[in-house]
Amino acid sequence: MGKELNKIPDIIISRLPVYYQHLKNLQSSTKEYVSSEELAELTGFSSSLIRKDLSYFGTFGRKSYGYDVYYLFQQISIIMGFNYKKKVIIIGAGHLGQALAYNKGYTERGYKLISIFDKNPKLIGLVINDIEIQSVNNLENFLQNNKVDVAALTVPGAAAQKITDRLAAAGIKAIWDFTEVPLKVPEDILLEEQLINEGLCKLSVKMNQQRLDKNGTTEDLSCGQK
Amino acid sequence: MGKELNKIPDIIISRLPVYYQHLKNLQSSTKEYVSSEELAELTGFSSSLIRKDLSYFGTFGRKSYGYDVYYLFQQISIIMGFNYKKKVIIIGAGHLGQALAYNKGYTERGYKLISIFDKNPKLIGLVINDIEIQSVNNLENFLQNNKVDVAALTVPGAAAQKITDRLAAAGIKAIWDFTEVPLKVPEDILLEEQLINEGLCKLSVKMNQQRLDKNGTTEDLSCGQK
DNA sequence: TAAAGAATGTTATTTTTTTAACAATAGTAC
DNA sequence: GTACTATTGTTAAAAAAATAACATTCTTTA
């Protein structure tokens, strides 16, 4: 009767990709078991937090041994839904769209890239990573004939809302958005903003902090009111 | 005498790029003032939280009016250190590296892309966005003659640690890392992991949740212990 | 000029998140 | 087989973050 069954806290969701990545990397090493302390070392999260996060989903470890790397990786994959097959398309075959087309990350996460769309006639027909770029005019038709789970949006900002509306009308339920404009979407559509420059922003803030600290500036960061 | 002057909480830092982006977009609209309530609408954060975040840095608003869009944008830019000039290089001119070379986001954030490196002879000499790809053999030499603030790392995972070591030895202080492998860096180097597939991961988790919810599954997500 | 309305900045409260502590348990050494 | 060690899963405590509430102040209107 509860409306939000099993609602995983966002803060935990945000750490899952990090656990996933490190467990995946650990597999190429020879380590069979890993302790929460070692994972803490790798991820930068505290061992206590890691044990707590994992215990949210169940109990995966072995006392005095730690976690079986492969088993935990499998479990995390299941928690993240990677064992479910999902289809993704890319809309916008500019430089970023093309880079995403070459992205190796789909398969291991249960995704399959099935088409790329663009409106530029010079790009239409071009084959990238075995997928032929097709005209965005075909979008609705394609979506009618193919169950697509996620649309990656890499069109110019100016076109973003229009495409989004078309996607929504065609029944898409999740958008992975790389355009840096605010999109309006119906409530039932999942929208994931991927701010490509986020890292640059954070680095700038932190370098700025270091600079201010070094100068021994006690002063407020603000510049007074207007 | 405090060691960490003005240490901005990470959680606030993580929202700054979002404020920045929306304020930037608001400028192309005709709105001169924006209220915390309207920003809440745009960002998804509560108005109370937004006012609190801003008050951490100073006082920028006007009672009963809201915030001057342009002024607040400027202030946020200053807080983020965008008024300081920074130089960035890209190492690895594969698809992602090239897409980053075409990225329009540098200038407005105070960055200037000054070089791209690769080891593939077929790429060396190629000009992208007015910048000639040069051999990674020149890396140390280049860094000696140019003050570079940030290195974007888009090399294959296998090469990542070696390049990182060379960057560290050459005195780089910040790395924007797109390789999905764990990098070891000296403590004084800022490392920003940009997990390119993070959005895909989150969407997968959330779609999985919806599926479980729909099935009315009360059962634990875990699959029992080994 | 006074009253009403709007929206900030800030304080108090609540909630969430993290850390710390530890009991339980499995493995190891002797 | 017993003592010792390691490491989990969990509970309790502390810290951090978010929300709610509101006093203040500015603007507008009459």
Image: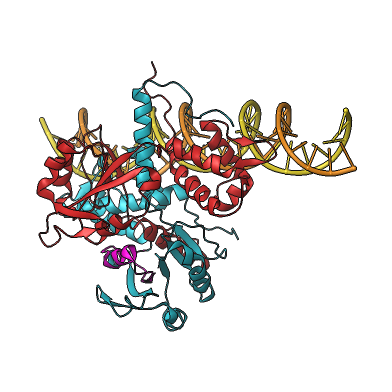
Chain colours: A cyan, B red, C yellow, D orange
Identify the residue at the far top of this view. Answer: B1
Q: Is residue D27 above or below residue A217?
A: below
Corner quadrant of residue C6: top right
Identify the residue at the far front of this view. Answer: B130
Spot occupied by residue C12 in the image (x, y as percentages of width and height) = 65, 28
Residue at position x 15%, y 60% in the image: B123
Residue B142 in sight here: yes
Residue span colored magenta = A82-106
Spot occupied by residue B216 in the image (x, y as percentages of width and height) = 52, 66
Corner quadrant of residue B110: top left
Corner quadrant of residue A70: bottom left
Q: Is residue B72 above or below residue B134?
A: above
**Per the image, is B116 magenta?**
no
Residue at position x 21%, y 34% in the image: B186
Answer with left or right where residue A155 lies relative to residue B129: right
Q: Is residue A177 above or below residue A39?
A: below
Q: Quadrant of the N terminus of chain A?
A: bottom right
Spot occupied by residue A64 in the image (x, y as percentages of width and height) = 25, 41
Spot occupied by residue A216 in the image (x, y as percentages of width and height) = 37, 20
Q: Is residue B86 above or below residue A76?
A: above
Q: Compare residues A103 and B133 and report the one nearer the observer.
A: B133
Residue at position x 15%, y 46% in the image: B163
